[in-house]
Image (cartoon, helix red, strand yellow):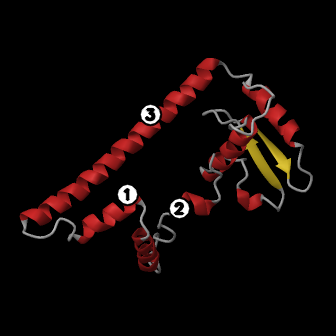
Amino acid sequence: MGDSGDRSSGISERRAAEHAGLWKADLGQAPHYTRAFAGGGWTCIACPLDNCDWHHDDPVAQPSAQEVLETKVREHLETHSVVDFLSSLQSARDNSTALRESNNRAWDLVSLHRLRAVHQGAHPTSDPMAQMLSAALVGTAEHEDVRAEVTRLSEGVAGAQNIASVPIAERGTVQL
């Protein structure tokens, strides 16, 4: 897929495979190992393409040389056709579009609450539900208060344990 020249300015195949290993593990696609196993045994590099189960588990105690891992990943990626890559890109585009549409629907709710407040003679941002939704959508610190309250309220409620969302950064997922 790529040349063996200097890759410091771009994303290497190995880094993409490390990201894919963590991503697939976070989605429960065994046998990929999460960071929880780092230091305790193995790290996983995986094919970044959808519907491909290829992976390589690398021992933490005796890690392979970076060049060796890069070669393993590159050799695997060369077994895929251009159609495989295009299919994966199309799937990513479809997922991004669905996420954008979901975000737009949530902003519609914020707008609805703000407009209802205006029609009732109140300030547009006076509605607490609109404030919470807006904070969640833009990722302000106030949303952490919502997570804390969800955690507090779920204590002792059957089936409600650990229902508060966890930021991706706190899950240990590698960002490319």
Marker count (numbered) = 3
Crowd band around label 2 with a 10 angstrom C-alpha radius: few (<14), some (14–19), many (20+): few
Would you name the residue on which mark 1 appears?
Answer: 137
Q: Tell me the distance, in whole angstroms, between the alpha carbons under discs 2 and 3.
A: 23 Å
- Residue 105 appears left or right of 33: left
The Cα atoms of the two marked residues, 3 and 1, are separated by 20 Å
Name which of mark 1 and mark 2 comes first in the sequence. 1
Label 2 sits on what residue type? Pro
Q: Nearer the viewer, residue 115 or 53?
A: 115
Q: Position of residue 27 (x, y in %)?
A: 59, 49
Q: CA distance from mark 1 to mark 2?
A: 13 Å
Q: Are marks 3 and 1 in contact (CB under 8 Å)?
A: no
Please, is residue 42 above or below residue 150 in the view?
above
- Mark 3 and mark 1 lie on one chain; the one further toward the N terminus is 3
**Label annotation for residue 167:** 2
Which secondary structure lies at badge 2? loop
Q: Residue at x 56, y 29 (%)?
A: 88
The quadrant where residue 69 appears: top right
Kind of residue indicated by mark 3:
Asp
Residue located at (92% from left, 52% from top)? 62
Numbered badge on residue 55: none
Q: Of discs 3 and 1, which sits in the foreground?
A: 1
Local crowd size for mark 1, using a 10 Å CA cut-off: few (<14), some (14–19), many (≥20): some
Q: Which disc number belongs to residue 94? A: 3
Name the quadrant of the N terminus.
top right
Q: Amino acid at mark 1?
A: Leu
Q: Seen in the image, is 29 located left or right of residue 104? A: right
128 up-or-down from 94: above or below: below
**In the image, what residue occupies the spot 25% across and 71% down?**
128
Disc 1, SS: helix
